[in-house]
Each structure stands twice: as structure tokens, then as C-alpha cells.
Image (tube, rainbow, N blue to C red):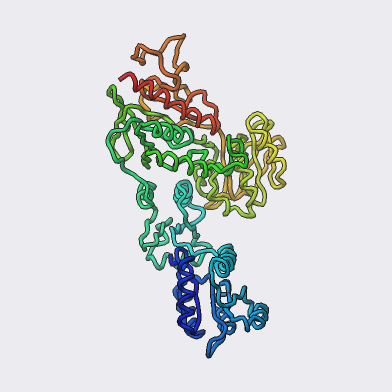
Amino acid sequence: MAKPVILAVDDDISVLEAVIQDLRRQYGTNYRILRAGSGQAALDTCSQLQQRGDAVALFLSDQRMPGMSGVEFLEKAQTIYPDAKRALLTAYADTEAAIKAINTAKINYYLTKPWDPPEEKLYPVLDDLLENWKEGYKPPFEGLRVVGPRWSARDHEVRGFLSRNQVPYVWLDPERSDEAVQLLERYKLDDQRLPAVLFPDGSALTQPNLIDLAARIGLRIQAEKEFYDVAIIGAGPAGLAAAVYAASEGLKPIVIEPDAPGGQAGSSSRIENYLGFPSGLSGADLARRAYAQASRFGTEFLTQRATGLRTEAPYHFVQLADGREISCHIVLIATGVDYRKLSIPGMDQFTGAGVYYGAALTEALSCRDEDVYIVGGANSAGQAAVHFARYARKVTMLVRGDSLEKSMSKYLINQIAGTSNIEVQTGAEVQEVAGNGRLECLKVKSKQGETVCQASALFIFIGAEPKTEWLPENVMRDPHGFVLSGPDLLIEGRVPKVWKESRQPFLLETSTPGVFVAGDVRHGSVKRVASAVGEGSISVQFMHQYLARF
């Protein structure tokens, strides 16, 4: 994108050259410095800049010019660039006229000649004007555009993937936006092949799978090496913490994540009980910081899904969805959990079209002035309720239990109680969802009986499923699929038969030596961000102890 313009105007060539040199020395890095030898030439330049869509931040014009005075030029330039700042250069004898021009021509400031030294007499004034201009300036967006209907599961998936990977984009719904229709025509795309991701270079992806999209936005989808010290599966808080400590302590880790850094925590709108952040921070911000920190220490991130794990002692092999394998000394399972599905009539039909699992913060703006329902009573549900209340007309929390006290932090309970457009219904469950092509209503059963509620969005936070079916049998799990480790492996005080080592398993080590587990996927874990970070961090200590045996 072209830099904003500072346009200097003066008919005296020597004065104009001096102005240009001073402007370039101070502002040339962030602005294009242009010149004109008369008011009319400057207006012609303005017209050309406007046709190209360039922004003008500041006009700096001499007052005494033949044919068109500086005040006259600035008045006319205002009609072309009304938001640009306007400063007048005058001789001492013209100061009275300049003062009058501040009112009549809405000139922002005047400067008397000479302005030497510029550090004292020119730059402070222009700095203030430019800072003030930048506050109201919104540069044209030149990044990705996503064109797709709101009530589309695939569109929701694409937007969510880009948002979680913190890739800026503009979303346009062809049912609501003329610009979306024009873009489809310009890119020669069929509206039956939406969503479409449009790139600034004129290319597009229609109905993309996430791996193809990951490759186009610059994410790594193939590993650089065949062997690593540590393969960390999952980039939630536990996996990111392990990556930071492993890489900072000399190990070569790779993090394998099919979606985006942050895990479920990455979609939290506000985490206010995390140590060291008294004002709170978003899950996306926490993920971004951790990703940058791990990358700085040399961690490699891979956008792929792990589909299998096999062991040929002393090595482990992680099988990927693209058919490749990565070998390593150590594996850390940090895949976290997914929200449990709600099995009621209509759910499959409307998932992604009004029904969403998790925070789905990409839908927040779309829910402006609408009625939103949230199912769940834990912290994640509470954080989502507070966030959506900023946009929705009303947020209703449907909680199966008789209160929030058993499952939610006190600070969130207080926030919810203090938010006027959040209603909490306890002892309530959704029985059915219905609509025509998208969610339109819910059937809710509560202590007062069954009611049908109009709703445009339903967000579900009802417990956790570990999704560990891809792991081999020699990695022991509890009946719910959570991975056993350390003391939890012991049966009547003894390690299971699958354990072939003479030593006891390390604290976070699974039933397969050299395979560790951390975070929410671990049996008995505390479902909090700080706990996951702690487990990921201390797992590296046990990794070193394991490697010391070789």
C-alpha cells in the first residue's frame, strides 16, 4: 500500500527545495513527500492522487503565490481531501491574514518563514498535526477477503481458521453486500462455490480445505526435518509452554497442530485470572505471545493433524494426515479436549448455521442486536456470555445445574450478575432446535415447563471429550479417553504389564516410555489455563531425565 502523502506547495523553487529536504529528513520513512510549484499544479496532483486512491495527510502551502494564494489553494484542496491537515507558510507581514484564514478556510495552523531550526519551529507543529490525522485515518484494507453466506458451516470454518491463526481478513456476505457481488464478478467466481478466499494478487480459493488454506497464508504444512528431539502434539497452553521450555533448554521441538495455536483457551474473549495480567488478556493474545516466544527459541510449528503413533524403541514415529511420518526421541500429547456434542433433534442440520461449539468469536459482530443462547455453566461459557453481551440484544445462559457456583469462577459470576442483558436460567436444557435453512428457534425445558424461544445463535459449552482414539492401545486411557500417566497408571500399587521398564514412570509419563502427556487431555487434570501451562512446563524436566538414560 502506498504511503500517505505530504504535499508541499511554493512558487519559489529555493524555498520549496528547502521545505522538501526538511520534510524528507523527518517524515520520509512513513510518508511520501511530494511538491508542486503553484496552487493549480497542486490541485492537479490532488486529483491524480484521488483517482489512484492515495491518502493525503498534510498540505503545507506558501501564502503568496501568483494566480492562486495559499489560502485559496487550501480551501479548494479541502473539497478533494477533507480530512487532510492544512498548514500555511507565511511571511511575518502576513500573519494577520493567516489568522483570519484559520477561521475562514479552516486552516489548522500557520508557520512563519524562516522556520530554522526545523527541530524547534517546524517539526513539533507538524508532528501534532500528523498524529491528529492518524487518529482518524483508516488505511484501505489490502489483505484477504472472505466472501460467503453467514449461514454456511464451511464459511464459518474458514473464517474461524483465519481468526484463530490471527490472519486479518474482511468478511463479505453476498446476501448483504453489493461489494461481495462485485468481487465475485471481478474474480469470475460462481456463487455456488462459496465460501471464496480472495487474495490481493488476484488469485482465489473456493471452498478450500484448511490445509490448502494454511499453505496459502504461509503456514508450514510439511516438516523441515525427519527427526526431532521432541514432537509436541497440540498447540494449546500446555503444548506452547512445553515448546518454550524445551527449545529454551536446548532441545529441538516441533509442534504439530491442525488448527491454530491456543487451543480452546485461544478462543476465550477474556482471561482475567491468569497470573501477571491484572487487567486480563484475551486467549488470542496469550496464544500470540506464546507462539512468538516459542518461535524465537527455535520451535518449528507444523499445521497438520496427527493420526497415529508407533514406537520402535528408542524412537517414536508420529503419523500425519498427509501420510508422512516424523520421528523423535520424545512425544508430548497435549491435544486438549473438544466440547461434547449435544445430541438433540436438529443439531447436525444447523451446526455452523446458527449452532456453534465453543466461543466462535467470529460470529460476535453478526449477532449484533439479536438474541443469543449459551448452553453451559463453566468458565468458558461465562466468558462467552460476557463477550457476546457487548453485541447481542440479550444473552440467555441455559445451565443444567441449580447454580453457577460449583463450576464457574467467582469473578465471572459477579460480571454476569452485573451485566443487564445477560439472563441465567438454571435447571434448563435445550430439547430441540429448528429453523428454515438456519437456526430460528429452540425448545427449552426448565422448571417452569417447556417453552419455544426465538434465537439466531446457540453456543454450546457442555463438558469435554479428549479425542484420543487415534492413539495406540499401549497408551493407556481411562474409560472416558483421558490419558493416564505417572501414579494413575498403577494398578494395586504396580505398573501395568504394558510397561516394560524396570523404573517407575515419571510423573507425566504415559504407559509408553518416552511418551508424556500434559494439559486437559491428561486424566485428572485441572481444567484451567495456568494448570495446563504448568504441566507443559514441568514436562520438560522429565524429558531431560528420560533422555539422560541414553
In this view, the residue in front, 449 or 249, is: 249
Give the image quarter of residue 418: top right
Quarter of the image containing the N terminus? bottom left
| Residue at 57% in and 50% down | 364
Where 175 sits versus 230, above or below? below
Q: Position of residue 380 (x, y in %)?
A: 58, 38
Q: Is residue 542 visible?
A: yes
Image location of residue 508, percent across then percent down: 44, 22
Residue 323 vs residue 74: left or right?
left
Give whichever of 16, 277 is nearer the camera. Answer: 16
Q: Is residue 357 left or right of residue 215?
A: right
Nearer to me, 441 or 499: 499
Say above or below: 68 vs 35: below
Foreground: 45 or 494?
Answer: 45
Where is 43 relative to 124, above or below? below
How many circles with numbers are drawn on the protein? 0
Q: Position of residue 510 (x, y in %)?
A: 41, 21
Q: Farthest bottom residue? A: 67
Image coords of residue 292 (percent x, y):
44, 43
The answer to whether residue 430 shows anywhere in this view is no
Quadrant in which the C terminus appears: top left
